[in-house]
């Protein structure tokens, strides 16, 4: 499993992107969109490039437009991965930003949401965030999870998940190749009473859902399809 593919096509980060705004939630700077009075929330967990990625915030805005309170916390604390820093390769960066730490902080964010009247929470995680999402699903801290081009997710993780889970993968992906996604699908299909969906998108690479070229019509279409599935899954299961 290598890092370069995960680090390809970094977004141009923009702290002012999106129709929402940033506030403090659960001790973290968090981009929020939608009505704070909504009883239904979706926690959107970024990849290694963080919560200021414009395409990620576009997804949050779309989720919010469907009636959810969309929250995108800064789980990496203003320290997005920078591929142009050779002295800090991905394994070194991950020592400071482990998914286990993200999981603990996500629990705090969910507690904060519930203290504000939210009754149901879904989670969608991209790459790094997918591992955090499935950990939340294993503990039933969320009502449903969506994993997009997951990294570091294992077959054992899928065996332990207890909530409806959708996994959207890329045909070209070192972190979650189609063979692994097939194993995920077999395990999830064998779980009675847990709704699941596994879909492999052809001709796309890891990161395609939020790190795409806006001038590439096919790339935009694939990303929009994946993010629509994310939204549909939350509408179906986060109630």
Image: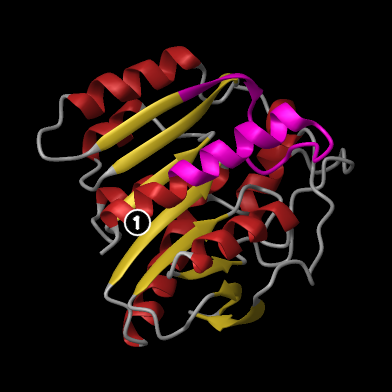
* Vertical order, 10 against 172 (above or below): below
Percent from the top left, x then y, of residue 127? 56, 40
Q: Quadrant of residue 174?
A: top right
Percent from the top left, x then y, of residue 91? 67, 38
* Vertical order, 7 against 238 (above or below): above
Residue toward you, 238 or 123 = 238
Q: Quadrant of the C terminus?
A: bottom left
Residue shown at 50%/49% (left/top)?
A: 125
Query: Label 1 crowding class (10 Å Cα cut-off): few <14, some 14-19, many 20+?
Result: some
In the image, taking residue 146 as reference, residue 217 lies left or right, namely: right
Which residue is farthest left? 192
Q: Which residues are magenta?
A: 200-229
Residue shown at 16%/24% (left/top)?
A: 190
In the image, taking residue 63 as reference, residue 49 lies left or right, namely: right
Q: Quadrant of the N terminus?
A: top right
Residue shown at 66%/48% (left/top)?
A: 48
Residue toward you, 166 or 134 = 166
Percent from the top left, x then y, of residue 180? 42, 18
- Number of marks: 1
Residue under circle 1? 235
């Amino acid at each position: 499993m290598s890092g370069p593919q995960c680090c390809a096509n970094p977004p141009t980060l923009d702290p002012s992107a999106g129709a929402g705004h940033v506030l403090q939630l659960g001790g973290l700077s968090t981009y929020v969109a939608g009505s704070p009075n909504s009883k239904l929330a979706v926690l959107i967990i970024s990849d290694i490039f963080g919560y200021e990625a414009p395409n990620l915030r576009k997804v949050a805005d779309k989720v919010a437009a469907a009636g959810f309170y969309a929250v995108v916390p800064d789980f990496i604390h203003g320290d997005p991965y920078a591929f142009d820093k050779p002295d800090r390769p991905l394994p070194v960066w991950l020592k400071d930003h482990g998914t286990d730490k993200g999981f603990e902080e996500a629990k705090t964010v969910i507690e904060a949401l519930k203290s504000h009247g939210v009754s149901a929470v879904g989670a969608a995680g991209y790459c790094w965030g997918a591992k955090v999402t499935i950990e939340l699903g294993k503990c039933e801290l969320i009502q449903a999870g969506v994993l997009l081009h997951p990294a570091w997710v294992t077959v054992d993780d899928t065996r332990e998940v207890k909530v409806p889970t959708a996994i959207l993968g890329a045909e070209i992906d070192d972190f979650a190749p189609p063979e692994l996604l097939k194993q995920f699908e077999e395990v999830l299909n064998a779980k009675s009473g847990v709704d699941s969906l596994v879909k492999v998108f052809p001709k796309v690479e890891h990161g395609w859902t939020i790190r795409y070229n806006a001038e590439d019509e096919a790339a935009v279409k694939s990303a929009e399809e994946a993010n629509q599935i994310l939204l549909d899954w939350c509408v179906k299961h986060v109630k």
